């Protein structure tokens, strides 16, 4: 179990780095697009589409890292005033519910990616990007997000992590 949790943690960190690189690439392409269009007066064909897909990909690819760092939106008022056992139950219920939602989303995104791959779908633009490239980060990111939720649940159940990061008896 420890090796699974540590492996998923390392993968989530690697996906976080990939998300940052995608955002940096999008920023550089926007700068290049501005230079090409307004300084050189040249046409831009692929830049807008690349930036859009890169930012969306960074969102999905980065989601496991955000969960790892506890960066998702969280209402922590209720857990602050609950006893430790109730916090544990709330944390497990919330994590399992989120995992179930993510599993459904992962399956749907895999199906979408697979249909685009098999059907050789392309964007209806001059660039004509194969859509499987655009859909792959969604399937990978949400798939790893599911694994990160499983690792979090295992860490809670084993006592490795405390629910909501609060030690027993800790209150404001």
Image (cartoon, helix red, strand yellow):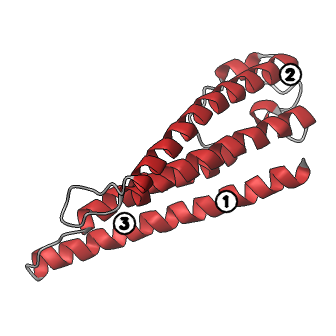
Secondary structure at badge 2 equals helix
Marks 3 and 2 sit apart, C-alpha to C-alpha, by 44 Å
Can the viewer see residue 59?
Answer: no
Q: Where 133 falls versus 89 (above or below)?
A: below
Q: Where 62 falls versus 168 (above or below)?
A: below
Asked where in the image residue 52 lies, by quadrant, the reply is bottom left
- How far across and how far down the image is residue 40, in percent? 11, 83
In the picture of the structure, the residue carrying the numbered disc 3 is: 26
In the picture of the structure, the residue carrying the numbered disc 2 is: 84
Residue at x-position 82% and y-position 50%:
5
Q: Quadrant of the C terminus?
A: top right
Secondary structure at badge 1 equals helix
Residue at x-position 10% and y-position 79%:
42
- How far across and how far down the image is residue 10, in percent? 74, 60
Q: Earlier in the sequence, mark 3 or mark 2?
A: 3
Q: Earlier in the sequence, mark 1 or mark 3?
A: 1
In the picture of the structure, the residue carrying the numbered disc 1 is: 13
Marks 1 and 3 sit apart, C-alpha to C-alpha, by 20 Å
Marks 2 and 1 sit apart, C-alpha to C-alpha, by 29 Å
Can the viewer see residue 158?
Answer: yes
Asked where in the image residue 39 lies, by quadrant, the reply is bottom left
Front of the two marks 2 and 1: 1
Q: Nearer the viewer, residue 45 or 116?
A: 116
**Circle 1 crowding by C-alpha within 10 Å: few under 14, some 14–19, many from 20:** some
Q: Earlier in the sequence, mark 2 or mark 1?
A: 1
Residue at x-position 56% and y-position 34%:
73
**Circle 2 crowding by C-alpha within 10 Å: few under 14, some 14–19, many from 20:** some
Q: In the picture provided, is 126 more to the left or to the right than 60?
A: left
């Amino acid at each position: 179990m420890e090796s699974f949790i540590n492996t998923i943690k390392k993968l989530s960190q690697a996906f976080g780095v990939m998300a940052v690189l995608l955002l940096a690439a999008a920023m550089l392409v926007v700068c290049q697009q501005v230079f090409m269009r307004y300084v050189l007066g040249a046409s831009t064909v692929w830049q807008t589409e690349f930036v859009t897909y890169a930012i969306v990909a960074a969102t999905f690819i980065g989601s496991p890292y955000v969960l790892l760092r506890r960066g998702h939106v969280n209402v922590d008022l209720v857990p602050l005033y609950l006893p430790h056992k109730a916090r544990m139950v709330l944390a497990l219920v919330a994590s399992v519910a989120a995992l179930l939602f993510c599993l459904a989303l992962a399956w749907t995104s895999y199906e979408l990616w697979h249909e685009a791959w098999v059907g050789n779908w392309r964007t209806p633009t001059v660039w004509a990007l194969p859509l499987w490239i655009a859909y792959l980060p969604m399937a990978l990111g949400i798939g790893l997000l599911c694994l990160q939720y499983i690792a979090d649940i295992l860490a809670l159940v084993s006592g490795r992590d405390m629910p909501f990061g609060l030690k027993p008896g800790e209150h404001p």
